[in-house]
Structures are given as structure tokens and as C-alpha cells.
Amino acid sequence: MAFKTIIEPFRIHSVEPLRMTSPGARRRAVREAGFNLFALHSTDVLIDLLTDSGTGAMSAAQWAGIQRGDESYAGSPSWFRFLDSVRDLFPFKHIIPTHQGRAAEKILFSAIGGPGKVVPNNTHFDTTRANVESTGAEAVDLLCAEGLDPAALHPFKGNMDTTGLEELLSSRNADTVPAVFVTITNNSGGGQPVSLANLHEVRDICTRHGVPLFLDACRFAENAWFIRMRERGQHSRTVREIVLEMASLADGMTMSAKKDGLANIGGWLAMNDDQLAVRCRNLLILTEGFPTYGGLAGRDLEAIAQGLREVVHHDYLQYRIRSTAYLGDALTKIGIPIVQPTGGHAVYIDARALLRHIPALHYPGQSLAVALYEAGGIRGCEIGTVMFGRHPDGTETPAAMDLVRLAIPRRTYTQSHIDYVIEVCDDVASHASELTGYRIVDEPPALRHFSARFEQLATA
Ligand SMILES: *Cc1c(COP(=O)(O)O)cnc(C)c1O
């Protein structure tokens, strides 16, 4: 008998208490935070779905690795275990450890960016865009048409628009495009995967134009699982084999180990180009540290080395992708519009569709995120006009979509936690027409969503 319930493939070994709060206390806390959920004390949050980044639970074997961490400044055995583990999946010539993904981005774009340069990506993640733009280069998103339609059902909505890429590369001098990026899975576009076929096409275009291809590989294992489940001819392969094929198509990668590294901190930058690696290592020493530890302690390198072995395990990935879909399916069933199909690490509620009465420049995503917190202590994250609406020239326009992301930390919450989330979402959606818009009263020049302060409008 094959049972249909997909259980958590682990049992609980140590626990962290959750603090229950009242709706009144939450309303006070969120007002004090300027209606910015990033400004809350996390002890005032019941179910924290702000991000899946660095928030997962580590395994007993990872904690054992933490104990084994060797803190030698140079050439530590922990470094070599990290290196072996990374190369087992991503056999690039140069592996450069960093304290997290954006440090890898900062170093790479400092080396290859600059005014007049253009970096195409299926969709730049916010820190990726900010690091490209801070060098004076332009970040261009080239997502396939299905990826821009939240309701469209397509197995690989993270695919790059290869016609757009071909046009961009044909219209420009190749040395103004220092790299093409593909983000797997596409975080800002709904956690949607990229197919192997699309990666092959992008590879061919890059080869024809002599431009290197880099992966933003934060969720490589989830992407590979989707390929295994959805792409023709892939089902009998292992995830590791698929990951190795993805890696073989690229010239380098940036990585945040806080996602599919199953660690709480860490990342790396990798490449085959010797000269570029020398420049990146020189920058690494300025800001991160010596090349055998980057910005990490030896124990962090151990946690990542073990996490990479666990993340490609099929039982883990089946549970991971299925438990995210469990939330997505339930919200769909009660009529809440979400980005379809459910992505790997998160469910994205289409706040613009749910709150049609709130115009994009009054931030429907922010309104919904605050309402979910006030009603049930759930912290999600606006991915929309607050995050992407302000441009370097100071203008503001609606983002392509206004979403609220409910990101699922890895191996952290159980099915009953998620059942509670479903109940709270149902309650908030049934009062959707009463929610109002917001305006920003204070914002920094870049990445404003982290620290902006808001005021609630009296009406939509
Ligand atoms: C998280 C993330 C990054 C940045 O990594 P950090 O570890 O948060 O600095 C870059 N790209 C994508 C797609 C991400 O999800």
C-alpha cells in the first residue's frame, strides 16, 4: 500500500518555544514598527514566513559538524570538506567562500560591472539588482511570458525569454555584457523553476555571443527536483546528476548557502576563469577574509558541507516541494489567488488580485502582509511595488506584480502550523474589502523595503 500522506522525513530532536500574542498586542507592535514587518521583534511573531533564508533547522549531523569545525586561519580541514562538498555538485575550478550570497554578488559585480555594462537575468533578486546597479551597470530582467502571468499554469515559469536574450546580445557589443545570469529557482518571480532545455538554449546563445553564463543557484536542489518531476526524460535521473548537468552548462555561479545549503549563514562564488578568480580573490581579502574561509568560521563551512549532502536527498526534496504545495493547494481551494503553480520555497499570494480596490501605488502587498500579521501573527514579505517600485532616477512605478510571499523555512514548521496559517489566510481574505492602502513616510535611497516606514491610509 502506498500511503498518500507525505510525512516530514525527520523527527524532532530539540525544540524552540513559540510565544503566543494577542491581536491587540500585534496591532501595537506593528504600529511601532512603522508598519514594516522587518522592524518587528521576531519574538512578537508566531509563524515567521518572512524568508526561507538561513531560517531552517539543521540536522544532528550538521550540529556534529559545528563541533568538528576547525578554526585554523588558513587551509583548515573544514575548508577542504566544504570544498569537496561544493565540487561534488558544482565542479568549478575556483570556489570562493563568502559570508552570504550578496557578498559573492558584490565581489563579482565589482569585478565585472561598471557604467555602460548590462547584466541580463531571468529575474534579478533584489540584492542582485542592487549590486549590479551600485556599480553603475544596468540590470535587465528577461523572463518568459508565462512567468509574468500569475495565473498561467506552466511547468517552468522561471525560464528565460531566450528571444529577448538573443535580441539583447545581437544589439550590443558583447564586451558590454560581462555575464548572463539565470536564477534557479526564480525567487522574485514566484519560486518558479527553469528547465534544463531552457538552460541549454541560454548556454547556446551565450556561446554564440562569447558571453559567460552564471547561475544564481540559491535553490538549485529545488529546481533540480522540479526538473526531475516535470521535464520529459528526467524522471529516472538522480537530483545530483541533474545538478551536475546544470553546473556543466555554466561558467560560474553565485550561491547563498542560507537556502539550499541548509545552513544558517554562508555562500560562495565560483567560476572557471583564472584571471577573473584572481581579481575576485583580491576583493575577497579586502572585505570577507582569506580565501580558505571567506567570511565564515570553520564550523559554518562544516554545516554547509553536510547540508549540501542532505539537500539533494530525494526524501527531503519530495517532502519539501510537497509541503509547500500543500499550503498553495489549500489557499487555492478557498479561493485565494496565488502564483500558479506553487513554487519550491514559498507560496506567493497575488495581493493585487485579492485587493483590487487598492491601487498598486498604495501597496496592496504591504496591506495584506500587515493584515496577516495583525490577524494571526504570521509574518510574510511584500514582493511588489514597495520592493521594486522606486527606480535609481527617483521615479516610482507599479512593479510587475504585487505579491505577498509566505516563505517556508526548511524542516522547521509542521503540518499543523501550516493548517493554522491556512485558517488565518482564510479569515483575512474574507474581510479583504475592508483593508486599506498605505503610503511611505520615510525611505532610504536603495532597498527601501528593509527600512521604510509607512502610514495607513483611511481608505484604499
Ligand atoms: C537570497 C538570495 C540572494 C542573496 O543571498 P543572501 O545570502 O541573502 O545574501 C541572491 N539571489 C537569490 C535568488 C536569493 O534568493
Image (cartoon, rainbow, N blue to C red):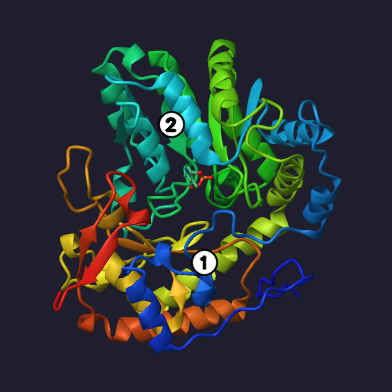
Residue 45 visible, this orientation? no
Q: Which residue type carries mark 2?
A: Phe
Query: In this rendering, is residue 423 above or below 284?
Result: below
Left or right of 224 in this view: 81? right
Which residue is under mark 2? 181
Q: CA distance from mark 2 to mark 1?
A: 27 Å
In the depicted structure, whether residue 64 falls above or below residue 415: above
307 with respect to 256 (left or right): right
Q: Give amino acid for label 1.
A: Ala
Pick whichever of labels 2 and 1 is earlier in the sequence.
2
Quarter of the image where the N terminus is located: bottom right
Helix, strand or loop status at disc 2: strand
Give the x, y percent position of residue 133: 32, 32
Task: Tell me if mark 1 has few (under 14), some (14-19) or many (20+) residues whose alpha carbon lies within 10 angstroms of its own.
Answer: some
Local SS, label 1: helix
Answer few, some or many: residues within 10 Å of disc 2's Cα (few below 14, many 20 plus, some between 14 and 19): many
Which circle marks residue 325 in the picture? 1
